[in-house]
Amino acid sequence: MKARLPRASTALATPVALAVATFPSYLPALPVALGVLVALSFLAVLAIARRIAGSRQHLTGPAHQVAVALGGALTAYLMFVTWTTQAAMRANIGMDPLSLSDIGVLVGAALGVVGAVRGVGWLWRLRPRMSRRMVAFVAGLSVLTFAPASAQAASISSDQVLLLKSPVGAVRAYAGLSDSADDAARARIAVDRLVAAGGLTREHLLVAIPTGSGWVNPEFVAGTERRFGSEVATVSMQYDDRPSWVAFLLDREGAVAGAQTLLDTVVAEVSALPLVQRPQVHVVGESLGATAGQAALLAPGAAGDARRETVCSTFWLGTPGGGRTGLPRETIAANADDPIVHARPSMAIVPTGEDRPWLPVVSVVHAGADVLGALAVPLGSGHRYGAEQPDRLQTCD
């Protein structure tokens, strides 16, 4: 029996969808994420192509064969380009190349999404009520496709470096949500622990505003202790237990309030000391912690003035949207491929102004996928910052 060729629309939609799904982005795509993007791009391009074609007569004969051959050739070429491009991006940041199992995950994710969407469409025509439940199920599966990055973020936040003993005799003090549900009480507990451990007698006092989950970057703590030895104390306070992106969207004000409360408590303790005995106070924030720390220092009024007068320097790592305060002795760490710093919702309709390829809608979708995988990369790329950063911290010597 003679094999039946695919429709011309399908053959030509496939390379277009592959080009859309693999359009240049900030980071190498996770295999499962790339599979989902390929599938959704294919379905969208195919729907547009068939809507444009409408009721026009389908290609037949030699024209059909040429369209299928052209689509196949373009697909093969783009698959080669995708493979080499992803390999180069991975090698550039120290990631392992795509393996055969990665390709299997990619293909499986793509086929699974296409099959699920086609199945929902079929059910919608037969039984609309059941299909609505299926839509919710498919949406849930789509969220789970990015579970590796979320799981990594969760495992990172569960390891609180400030609860571990410093190997160089530096002071570490921390208060979590389990210590108190009240910001003021929790800040008091953190600072009391700092004072009891002799933190105010050290030359440098680092106030670390954590990420949404309460995580303080152990690489940064290790870097400051390598630089200053036992003459540094670090204090921090948890203000939420959700991943940063969830807290950023749902309760950014809570993060700012937590940062303000901790800073005010530290400022009160430091200000009570004789001028010659006061440590240099440095504020460091990463991710949502950077946003919260900046807002706390830029707040108007007497409290904001007191914070700014007490703080020697600031250091912001991976600030969402790339914000900064403009205060003296401010240091910014922003990886060039960190989508959380550089991506904007406005990318859907206007370029970011950075020297990178851009397409309307497509670029913002890719940026969203990159955000979800921004922690699943080696240190020094994406939204991960290493132990070399504290060498740039400015002092008041």
Image (tube, rainbow, N blue to C red):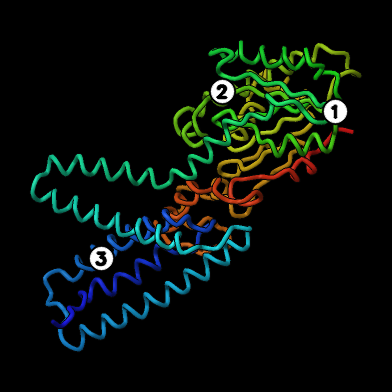
Decide: few, some or many residues near mark 3? Use Cα within 10 Å; few <14, some 14-19, many ≥20: many
Q: Read off the residue under disc 3.
A: 46
Q: Nearer the viewer, residue 185 or 241?
A: 241
Alpha-carbon distance for marks 1 and 3? 63 Å
Compared to 340, does 238 lie above or below?
A: above
Number of marks in picture: 3
Decide: few, some or many residues near mark 1? Use Cα within 10 Å; few <14, some 14-19, many ≥20: some
Considering the image in quadrants, where does the C terminus appear?
top right
Q: Mark 1 belongs to which amino acid?
A: Ser
Q: Could you tell me residue 165's position as x and y percent?
A: 75, 25
- Name of the residue lying farthest toward the bottom: 62
Mark number for residue 230?
A: 1
Alpha-carbon distance for marks 2 and 3? 46 Å
Q: Quadrant of residue 47?
A: bottom left
Q: Could you tell me residue 203's position as x and y percent?
A: 86, 26
Alpha-carbon distance for marks 1 and 2? 27 Å
Q: Could you tell me residue 150's position as x and y percent?
A: 48, 40
Horizontal side of 360 relative to 165 (left or right) equals left
Disc on the earlier residue, 1 or 2: 1
Mark 1: secondary structure: helix
Q: Read off the residue under disc 2.
A: 239
Q: Mark 3 belongs to which amino acid?
A: Leu
Compared to 294, does 263 lie above or below?
A: above
Q: Mark 2 belongs to which amino acid?
A: Tyr
Q: Quadrant of residue 103?
A: bottom left
Mark 2: secondary structure: loop
Which label lies toward us, 1 or 3? Answer: 1
